[in-house]
Amino acid sequence: MDNGKITNKTVEVIEKALGDLKDNKASKQEVLDLIDERKAKDVEAIEAAKKEVADVKSQADELKTLADNLQKQVRQLKAAEGYSPDSKGRYNGIYSSPVEAKLVGLAIMAASMTAGMGRVDVARKRTAILKALDRMGAEVNWLDDNGKKTATTTSQASGSALVTIEQAPGLILLLEQYGVYRRNAMPVPMGAGQTPTPKIDQLLTVYVPGEGTAPTLTDPEAKCLMLTPKVMTALSAYSLELDEDSAIPLAELYGQLFARSFAYYEDLCGFLGDGTSTYFGFTGIVGALRAVDSTIGNIKSLVVGAGNAYSELTLANFEAVAGTLPTGADDENAKWFVHKYFYYTVMVPLAIAAGGTPMSEILLGMQRRQRLYLGYDVEFTQVMPKAEANSQICALLANLRLGAMLGTRGGMEFAQSDQRYFDQGLVALRGRNRVAINAHGVGDTTDAGPICGLITAAS
């Protein structure tokens, strides 16, 4: 069984039990006992799942199956006029309008069909698609391999088509919808290369000088935060047999596919990045916190838990994290960032056991469909840990608007290659997303920053 399904089922059971507690159908102790029982069963189920060995299909078969499924979905959507209308027959897709959806789909098709320009039928389709884009008043931005606009209005053999924010804001909204880091960090528009951003931490000195006396000049020390863009790339497959009428379903399908994928990796790098190749060289929040000092007790933005196991963490540990967050960062943008399973199996039981305000806050939040903990909103990010480990940063309380940045370069690019899946009659569709990540608000060994966290003990 998939580990995610195991833990998701536990979360559902705990949520139901919390509802029973709110309705006085269960006692606090019954809910706590249920949580302990579910956690024990999860450990057994996950260990059993690890022993199961499944047959592994070849990569080519998996890609072929994926491509077949994608094309099947496109045809199904096409049969339904490209999207699922609401009860009144209106557009109900992921973009702001069917026009925007069609624009994205046509841009993807224009980029992909460069691969088949040697075929008369494909060249004819591509010409029709470019004319359709022109009729819509959309200019296709062709980029070279370095991400720079080319001087021509037709695509290059190795270039890509850029779908910009102005053309398709729905694509960017999708990234924000799925991406926790993108949604909360400070957005910074970028140029082609590195983008320096000044940061001033100290306040100016204020004087009340007498008449005829000049105030003393304060020379604040300005740090320079550097945003270095990197290109995230994902690959899928596309059939050249699709025509202009397939534009809307194509945009619906690939828009979600690429947006979800890029958003997940932005979260992975933004929260957990340690500068290694695993995280594409990005240093995210956890990596930046650990880089402050090799001794975790010296990192002022971190509170060391009462033990190295989740069962040893206390409500006082979480309260200490809240107390560590600087006053200047304590506004509506300050949130807990944790794994959903960690929230329901660690944080919720501590609040229930404490009773009073902590428990009432949990139950009130459920009623309002808003998760709260110690007065702060809780946002789930599934890249945060759910299994305990020594010296593990398991929970963050952070104001990412003040402590983290996400540099972006315009939009999402699409390019093609007809070589990779030549034997399957498919074109490889490549999506590229240029971003930069900088988690700068982690404090130092003297003061805490706007990004604080709870770390388990070393042993």
Image: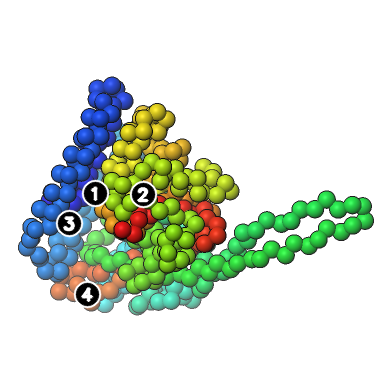
Name the residue tied to disc 1: 77
Residue 306, label in figure? 2
Q: Earlier in the sequence, mark 1 or mark 4?
A: 1
Measured Cα–Cα span from mark 4 to mark 3: 18 Å
Residue 420, label in figure? 4
- The amino acid pointed to by label 3 is Asn
Measured Cα–Cα span from mark 3 to mark 1: 12 Å
Circle 4 crowding by C-alpha within 10 Å: few under 14, some 14–19, many from 20? some
Q: Nearer the viewer, mark 2 or mark 4?
A: 2
Does 352 sit left or right of 396 as displayed? left
Residue beneath the point at 32% across and 33% down: 353
> How has the structure been colored for display?
rainbow
SS assignment at label 2: loop
Measured Cα–Cα span from mark 1 to mark 2: 54 Å
SS assignment at label 3: helix
- The amino acid pointed to by label 2 is Ala
- The amino acid pointed to by label 1 is Leu
Q: Nearer the viewer, mark 3 or mark 1?
A: 3
Measured Cα–Cα span from mark 1 to mark 4: 26 Å
> Residue 75, position in %: x, y?
20, 53
Name the residue tied to disc 3: 69
Q: Earlier in the sequence, mark 1 or mark 2?
A: 1
